[in-house]
Image (cartoon, rainbow, N blue to C red):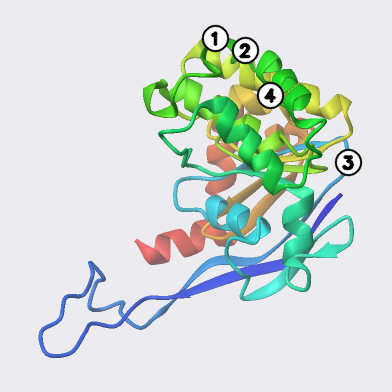
Amino acid sequence: MLEVEKLGKTFKLPRRAKAGGKTGGVDPRQEGRSFHALREVSFKVEAGEILGLLGPNGAGKTTLLRTLSTAIAPTRGTARFDGVDIREEPRRVRQRIGFLSGSTGLYGRLTPREMVSYYGRLHGVPAAELPARVDALFAELEMQSYADKRNDDLSTGMKQKVSIARTLVHDPDIIILDEPTSGLDVHAAAGILAMIEGLRRTEKTVLFSTHHMHEVERLCDRVVLIDVGIKVFEGSVAEMREAGGDEALDRAFLGLLGKGQGATLRKGAA
């Protein structure tokens, strides 16, 4: 189970260098100010549950997922994976989770088999078990035909599947996926969605972000919607439709964005 408790992350915008130094693209009116990427976000994901994380671009979704993965530290609040605290025991957290980031970040000269096996060894998968585990993942994700080609020679969809296999090779209890089907064609995306569906049957805890409402309708037991770092909704897909005032999920999503504190802050920042 994942428990997120009043999680917040604040970034300081850099000041300009003295003596004519460059600003790095920072608006001079904003330099030195604090930017609140997350504002006391709280929710839970149970074992065997798939929770969809929704929000417009810049809402804080990736910051939230990176914080949960311990890639960045929270400014306030915390989260626990089956009781293991991300602030107190980040190394134990990393052993328990599988995290798919928004970029593949593959070693181009390695093959998918070499890449996934390497990460399996890093996670301590026993050497006697590792080849069979890699083969099973490649079969599930339909990767056998390019398992021994160099990563540099793979398509975007193939690379994404390598990243997913790397995320799952150590059989993590909690799986965090940042837009797993982004940039993929229909066939590749369908295979990944089927794989995510299968994780529910193994009692995994799954949190994934997406912009695709058909993925939400197909996969999600519940959804969390954040806007300008604030949680503006948490509930089932049916409850999202009701709260957003529309049976069409995309219009319900837009309806929820037009309400409450998130909408007020967005207008104030415009």
The residue that disc 3 covers is 47
Q: Who is closer to the viewer here, 99 or 239?
A: 99
Amino acid type of the residue that numbered disc 4 sits on in the rendered structure: Glu
Q: Is residue 83 above or below residue 224?
A: below
Q: Residues within 10 Å of mark 3 (few under 14, many from 20)?
A: some
- Dot placed on the residue nearer the N-terminal end, 1 or 4: 1
Q: Position of residue 27 (x, y in %)?
A: 24, 72
Residue under the point 67% across and 57% down? 68
The quadrant holding residue 208 is top right
Eye-nearest disc, 1 or 4: 1
Q: Position of residue 227 (x, y in %)?
A: 55, 54
The residue that disc 2 covers is 142
The Cα–Cα distance between marks 4 and 3, rounded to whole angstroms, is: 19 Å
Amino acid type of the residue that numbered disc 2 sits on in the rendered structure: Glu
Q: Are marks 2 and 3 in contact (CB under 8 Å)?
A: no
Q: Residues within 10 Å of mark 4 (few under 14, many from 20)?
A: some
Residue under the point 64% across and 30% down? 165
Eye-nearest disc, 4 or 3: 3
Q: Who is closer to the viewer here, 76 or 72?
A: 72
Q: Is residue 131 above or below residue 256?
A: above
Eye-nearest disc, 2 or 1: 1
The residue that disc 1 covers is 145
- Dot placed on the residue nearer the N-terminal end, 3 or 1: 3
How many numbered discs sit on the rendered protein?
4
Amino acid type of the residue that numbered disc 3 sits on in the rendered structure: Ala
Amino acid type of the residue that numbered disc 1 sits on in the rendered structure: Ser
